[in-house]
Image: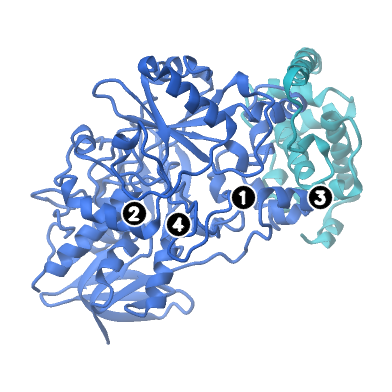
Amino acid sequence: MEKCSLLFMTPDKREVLCAEARYLHSSLFYRYPTDNLVDAYLRAHIEIPDLRAIDTRQLRTVNLVVKHSLDAVGIEPWLRIKVRRHALSAKLLLIAYLAECDASHPEFMRHTTGGWLTLASMGNAGFISVFRLLRGHIQKAWHGLV
Amino acid sequence: MDWFNFVVAGSGPGGVAAARRLEGKGTCIVDIGITPEQVFPHASLGEGLASGDIESMLGSHWEMLTNLVEPGRVHPKLRAPGVRYVASGQAFRVHDASGESYLRGAGSHAAGGMSNAWGAQLFRYNDADFAEAGDWPINADALETHYADIEAHIGIAGEVDDMYGFLGETTCMLPPTPIVPAADYLLARYRKCRSYANLCLGRSRLAILTKPYRGYPEHGFNETEFFSTEQLGLYTARRTLDELRDGGRLTYLGGYELVAYREYPEFVEIDLRQCDSNAVRMIRTKHLLLGCGTLQTARLVLLNKQAVGRSLPFIDHPPTLAPLFIPRMFGTTLPARSFPVQLVATINLPAQRDMISFYYPGALLWSDLLADMPLPMDAALKLLPNLLGGMLVAQIWETSRPALENRLSLTTNGSIRIDYPRRSPYARLNSLLTALRLLGVYSLPRLATLAPPGWGFHYAGCLPMRHRPTSFETHTDGRLWDSQRVRAIDGSVLPSLPAKNHSLTLMANAARIADETLRCEY
């Protein structure tokens, strides 16, 4: 992947995408990404044509989510109802793919807990889901996100 | 000018099966024969993920993210740099009832054809299959010796169990492939409950070597199916092609595309375009066997007859996909090695033929699954490691017959157009889910999706075999309706598709047609 292609990105655009990468990563993983992951996120936006051609209304939604620190992960499932792959879904997925392949995210380690810990872990995930979906629904409606 | 007794066009399963019968008899294989330019650099999926090398996993041009914004643009198995070459052939579009395109695809110009990306399930058809699907002018006896010969050539892993009769009475099988704990649980539950299970379940029949065979090593079950076609121990037609080439008993013209043919009373003249230089070379043969794949063979025949306005019947096996959950197996240790195909089943109801393959999604990246889970992605990610141990995916095929509305034709610029307005959802889904619930396996009908036509790669029916063929049909010996020396030997001649994978039958039929060609006295 050509690193010099980043030079052809305007500073404003680069700043927006860096902020996106940091915010979306922290939404998913509760911590900021490494510089390498941010770099890969930027390169993907240069080299994947689909990411350069996203609908402007959907991009506005992404910008609002990042600008107002809304619950990206809680809002995203609601956006999927009308648009199978909304820009926010695509960008969160991009973060997920990069994280899965950079070998530094234990969330992708293929290990299990077993027994009661499994139930507790799944129950916890379910509880988090309900909370984030509720919050996401409210924020989506409040900010008029489409 | 080069002269051959037999020319086989294409090196996919049909082409190599026919060529095996014709080697040593003045035979030439003509093949574009693309091979992978990039090779997956890791021995296993686990090793790749542990390497931290994003480029080797996602592709230097982000190939694995092709479906990021447009889901389903490319079949998940054809995204990776090491696999994309398989679908580098003639492009086609599939259109729905309103004329909207709902799938773009391509045939294969690869050495070994689409078998490079197949799931390796190889089943026999029997007379009950032919009767159920209809329109077959041959019976199972005609294919029996070829089934046995090809199975011995390939090496088939399987087991004599409740599915043995349904999948065909293959003998001399290698030990069955290992299955994941979730599949093992399902099989054990079935064996306890089989008397009232309303389902017949067993091991699949796979072209996988579970021990060294004919000098080939066993398969490593390294979960690289979505990243590489270069898998030791997994049969593809390219293995047979390599044997034929190395054996020196036929001529291989690789890097050539068959662009036209002309039949004369004593021979067939063929125009070959060299892919590198575009130079055209002419050869002659007594008999031409077209095995370029259903789409590409149909296209060649239509172009030969200058029948651009003509449409041909087109059949596919669009599968229904349904995630299945086995709560008793949630949280179990995920296997380090696995193969996608686990088990097969059929609903044991009278006069109803369908086949359910049970897959374990271990070879997929977890990110491939996140967007399909109706949850916030962080919760989905927390659930996945515990869920996957108890998760399988059902891929359901039903008998597929020609429908008047489902047609293949050529556009004015010679590209392939498929209209497939007639497709029905799987009518027995509720029965299947009820049967599975008894075995501790759960799902919901609303989670099932019907794949679009063209997605399943089981293409057939464009030049169907008949006892008395009319225009754009074929004789039972493969000859085109108005031809003495030109035959079709791939899926294009299969008149309908029983619920089972057609790959082994396609190969056996190609071998049968090759034998018919040998018996020709001209």
Image quarter of residue B127? top left
Residues flagged by tags 4 and 3 on a common chain? no
User: What is the CA distance from the residue labelled 4 to the residue labelled 2?
Assistant: 11 Å
- Residue B222, which numbered label? 1
Name which residue lies at 40% across and 40% down.
Answer: B159
Residue behind mark 3: A40
Crowding at dot 4, Cα within 10 Å, few <14 / some 14-19 / many 20+, comes out as many
Which mark is in front, 4 or 2?
Answer: 2
- Residue B235, which numbered label? 4
User: What is the CA distance from the residue labelled 2 to the residue labelled 3?
Assistant: 47 Å
Residue behind mark 2: B151
- Chain whose colour in the figure is cyan: A
Which mark is in front, 4 or 3?
Answer: 4
Local SS, label 2: helix
Crowding at dot 1, Cα within 10 Å, few <14 / some 14-19 / many 20+, comes out as some
Give the residue type that dot 4 points to: Tyr
- Chain whose colour in the figure is blue: B
Give the residue type that dot 3 points to: Ala
User: What is the CA distance from the residue labelled 2 to the residue labelled 1?
Assistant: 24 Å
The numbered mark, 2 or 1, whose residue comes first in the sequence reads 2
Name which residue lies at 18% across and 35% down.
Answer: B131
Residue B446 in the figure: left or right of residue B12: right
Give the residue type that dot 1 points to: Asn
